[in-house]
Image (cartoon, rainbow, N blue to C red):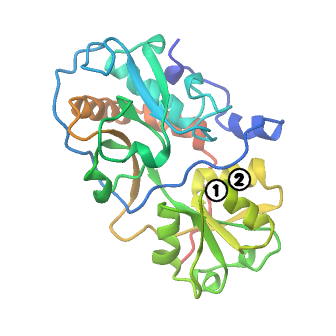
Amino acid sequence: MNPSRSRRPLRSAWVHAALGGAVLVGAAACAPEDEGGAAGGGGSAACEPGALPTLEEGVLTIGTDSPAYPPWFVDDDPSSGKGYESAVAYAVAEELGYAEEDVVWESVTFNNAVQPGPKPYDFDINQFSITEERRKAVDFSSPYYDVRQTVVAMAGSEAAEAASIDDLKKVDLGAQVGTTSLDAIGEAIGPDTDPQVFNNNDDAKKALENEQIGALVVDLPTAFYITGAELEDAEIVGQLPALEGGDEQFGLVLDKGSPLTDCVTGAVDALRDDGTLAELEKEWLSDAAEVPELS
């Protein structure tokens, strides 16, 4: 069974599992810098099902970071097919002609995955926003997810009562380094004081709990996980306006000039056209629905 095409229980399973005692802690990596557009421009290969010029013949190697966080992955197990990005990865593999048993996962840190040079994966999936800066070092597939940045605060705090962007200007804000969440603080809010920058979202969440910052900016699915499964008294304040340049989108990352880029893009496009991406988003990310828009 290919997990990408199975019909699982209600997609909020990752939240319920976490609330029931799952050990995963921390938030997914936030959306990377800048905003992006469509696909990158790699080389080309005949997109023969199951016979692409992959790193290892007959095997599709997919990279992601470790730990792999909900809602993008479940139980820190990318090979489970559970979680939005795991499911998308297996759906792409199936489109390319690779069965579940032909897929292997490679642990690659977020920053290393988008550095120049040979890659240990055929493609990587880890909430990478498509950016012109990153396109200098890697190829991107066409986008598989549109991203919104979101403000999270502890209930009863000044930030939690914010009803507008102006209300957030005087709040001490924080975000993970190198992410579009951090960019969004400057571009969408323009706070009176510089935001605090953290190595990862786990550190940022601790700072929020300890009142070292008044609010944290993360992407919307990560905000749902933080408020639903990790920080009991945290709540989503609202969504920030889109960054300058248009919608922010996640794409699969490939080596610069990879002969697989066109085939992978074709697979993503097919999954969008036949409704698979929408189904997977509904299954794993549907809580990302009616969150207030801040303006």
In the image, what residue occupies the spot 78% across and 35% down? 22
Q: Position of residue 44 (x, y in %)?
A: 16, 30
Relative to residue 107, is residue 93 depicted above or below? above
Q: Disc 1, disc 2: CB below 8 Å?
A: yes
Give the residue type at disc 2.
Answer: Ile
| Residue 126, x across and y down, in percent | 48, 42
167 is higher (above) or lower (below) than 217 = below
The answer to whether 148 appears left or right of 201 in the picture is left
What's the CA distance linking mark 1 and mark 2?
10 Å
Q: Residue 63 appears in which quarter of the rendering?
A: top left
Q: Residue beneath label 2, please?
A: 226
**Is residue 59 visible from the viewing direction of this image?**
yes
Label 2 CA crowd tier, 10 Å (few <14, some 14–19, many 20+): many
Residue 127 seen in the current view: no
Upstream in the sequence, badge 1 or badge 2? 1
In this view of the protein, which residue sits in the foreground, 281 or 99?
99
Please, what secondary structure does the residue beneath circle 1 have?
A: helix
Residue found 56% across the figure and 39% down from its top: 282
Residue 227 image position (x, y, % from top left): 74, 55
Estimate the x, y position of residue 248 in percent, counting from the top left: 40, 58
| 67 left or right, relative to 149 | right
How many labels sit on residues? Answer: 2
Secondary structure under the numbered disc 2 in the rendered image:
helix
Residue 201: numbered disc: 1
